[in-house]
Image (cartoon, coloured by chain):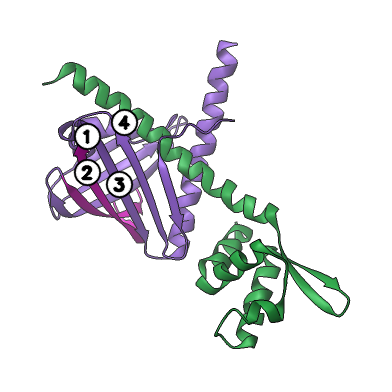
Chain colours: A purple, B green
Amino acid sequence: MENNSKTEFVVDLQNKKATITRMFDAPLENVWRAWTEKDLLDQWWAPKPFTAKTKIMDFKVGGRRFYAMVSPDGKEGWSIQKYTSITPKTNFKMYNTFADKDENPQLPGSDWDVTFSEQNGTTKVCIIITNESLDRMNKMIEMGFEAGLTATLGNLEELLQTS
Amino acid sequence: MNLRRDVFQAIADPTRRAIVTLVASQVMTAGAIASNFDTARPTVSKHLQILTECNLLVQEQKGREIYYNLNPEKMQEIADFIEPFRKMWDDRFNKLEIVLKNLKKNGK
């Protein structure tokens, strides 16, 4: 299997930190919008075959996004992202927790630091996720594990249908 | 998954990570490993015990000495564990790329 990933990914277990970097062939303005507008976010936030459903979106310092990742069989996994700092078109920070459907957070959570920069029409996005505990770090990776596994199975299904 | 957590907790400690890095370059005795650290020898022994218990290191008896080997399969397991998380971000960003293409097409 060839690795043609354009996503740079570093997991630092010692500091309970993950750093994810990617370049996009798009102006900064649009990338910022895609991260901060509900309708745009819901179009890409969930990896296949999940869908994202944002119930509350209030992009301002002290505001929050309350959203679910919905699996193909309708199971909803809720999360809260509380915006703690916003520097328009440059950076925003948020505190992220898993939650139940009534918006009760499951602590501890993780701090996200998302930085945007543009050079010659290409926009770089760098996300630094710092978890409050190693258990939280493992849980985050395991959630990704489930999503990744389901995505792989979804791709397989597609492959089988077309052959 | 307790097994996973154990491995991750094992390598979350800076000294144990350093030990894994050392042993990755060559097979070593406990004494040779300990000589690389300022930490007291019993502390290093404790770290070696934890790494051995979760199977990251394997002991091998050669004469009177016990040598420590890195278990590559276990290391691969850690890499495999993280890989789907990386893939999730890759999928997510591939979708974002499409959203951005549409924005460019439609908007000014």
Please name whichever residue, A33 or B37, is drawn nearer the observer in this view of the structure. B37
Query: Is there a contact, CB below 8 Å, between mark 1 and mark 2?
Result: yes
Amino acid type for the residue under numbered disc 1: Val
Position of B102 with respect to B107 (left or right) is: right
Amino acid type for the residue under numbered disc 3: Cys
Q: What stretch is highlighted in magenta?
A: A90-119
For the residues marked 1 and 2, what is the alpha-carbon distance in whole angstroms?
8 Å
Mark positioned earlier in the residue sequence (3 or 1): 1
For the residues marked 3 and 4, what is the alpha-carbon distance in whole angstroms?
14 Å
Residue position for label 2 = A116
- Residue A107 in view, yes or no: no
Please name whichever residue, A123 or B95, is drawn nearer the observer in this view of the structure. A123
Residue position for label 4 = B96
Is A58 magenta? The answer is no
Residue at 40 percent of width and 54 percent of height: A18
In this rendering, is residue B66 above or below B5? below
In this rendering, is residue B15 above or below A21? below
